[in-house]
Structures are given as C-alpha cells and as structure tokens.
Amino acid sequence: MQELKWDNTLSVQVEEIDEDHRRLVELFNLLGHALAEGESRAYLEALLDELIAATDWHFKHEERLMIRHGYPGFEEHRKEHQELIRSIREIHDKRLAEGRQLSPKDVEYLEHWLTGHILGPDMDLGAWLNEQG
C-alpha cells in the first residue's frame, strides 16, 4: 500500500480544515500500514472505527463552517458527506458480518474517496471560504 503524503496538493488553504485532513491522512496511513504488517483483525477494526469517527466529526465540522459562512454549495456537499460515511460504514459492517478483515482493495477504495473528496468538493469549499475573507 502506498502511503499518502500530506503536502500543498491536499491543502484547501483553510488551516482548521487542513488540520482535520492531516489527521485523516495520518489515520488512513496507520490503517494501511497495519494491514500490510498483518496486524490483528481487532486492531484493524479499532483503527477503522477511529477513522470513521474522525471522518464523521470532520464532516460535521465542515458543515458547521458552511452554515456559519452561508456556503451556497452546502446541501450538495453535505449529501456527499452522507454518502461517503454510508459507504465506509457499509464496508465496515460487511467485513464484520463476514468475519473478515479489510482487504487491500478496501483500503484503496478509502484512499480514493478521501483524496477525491479533498481534491474536489473540499478544494471548492476552501476557495470559497478564502474569498469571503
């Protein structure tokens, strides 16, 4: 698994959002390393639980900022948050029900949604917030 590197490519130029994103990248990397190193299923589940909780908190944080500043793309952005959380919980619940741990394919999927969301909707939000001053 390739480690995600935090750099300006992932920065939305809003420090409080970037701080959250750095933590999500850190958790994602911990999860990927744990999988590659053959950590126990219980440990992987604990890391995934933490990643889900941190992501959910971050999304609520972003939504609060969007509401506070009157972001015009709020509803669409929030719907994407809801879909992302739903999809990661589905992966988690399916693995638990099957008695299996995460697969490298699951981690790849998580990487794509994390980076895709940061590089897409979050960049738009960051640009808009920076225009507001």
Image: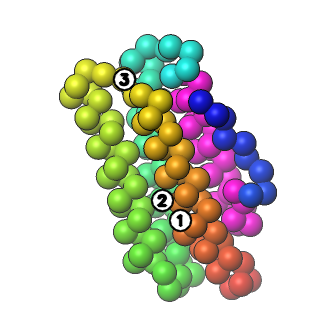
Is 69 situated above or below 11? below
Query: Which callout, 1 or 3, points at the residue further toward the start of the chain?
Result: 1
Q: State yes or no: residue 14 in magenta.
A: yes
**Part of the protein shown in magenta:** 10-34
Q: Is residue 12 magenta?
A: yes
Can the viewer see residue 56? yes
Q: Residue furthest right?
A: 8
Q: Name which residue lies at 50% across and 86% down.
A: 72
Q: Secondary structure at mark 1?
A: helix
Mark 1–mark 2 contact, CB under 8 Å? Answer: yes
Q: CA distance from mark 1 to mark 2?
A: 5 Å
Query: Which is closer to the viewer, label 1 or label 3?
Result: 3
Residue 34 x %, y %: 54, 21
- Which label is found at residue 59? 2
Instruction: Read off the residue under disc 1.
Output: 62
Amino acid type, label 1: Glu
Element type where label 3 sits in the image: loop
Against 50, residue 71 (above or below) is below
Q: Residue at x 74, y 66 (%)?
A: 13
Question: Alpha-carbon distance for marks 3 and 2?
Answer: 25 Å
Q: What residue would you read off at disc 3?
A: 101
What residue do we see at 69% from left, 85% from top?
Answer: 132
Q: Main secondary structure of the magenta part?
A: helix
Above or below, comparing residue 23 to residue 79 in the picture? above
Q: Is residue 50 visible?
A: no
Q: Residues within 10 Å of mark 3 (few under 14, many from 20)?
A: many
Question: Would residue 130 be found to the left or right of residue 60 on screen?
Answer: right
Q: Nearer the viewer, residue 105 or 30?
A: 105
Q: Which amino acid is tagged 3?
A: Gln
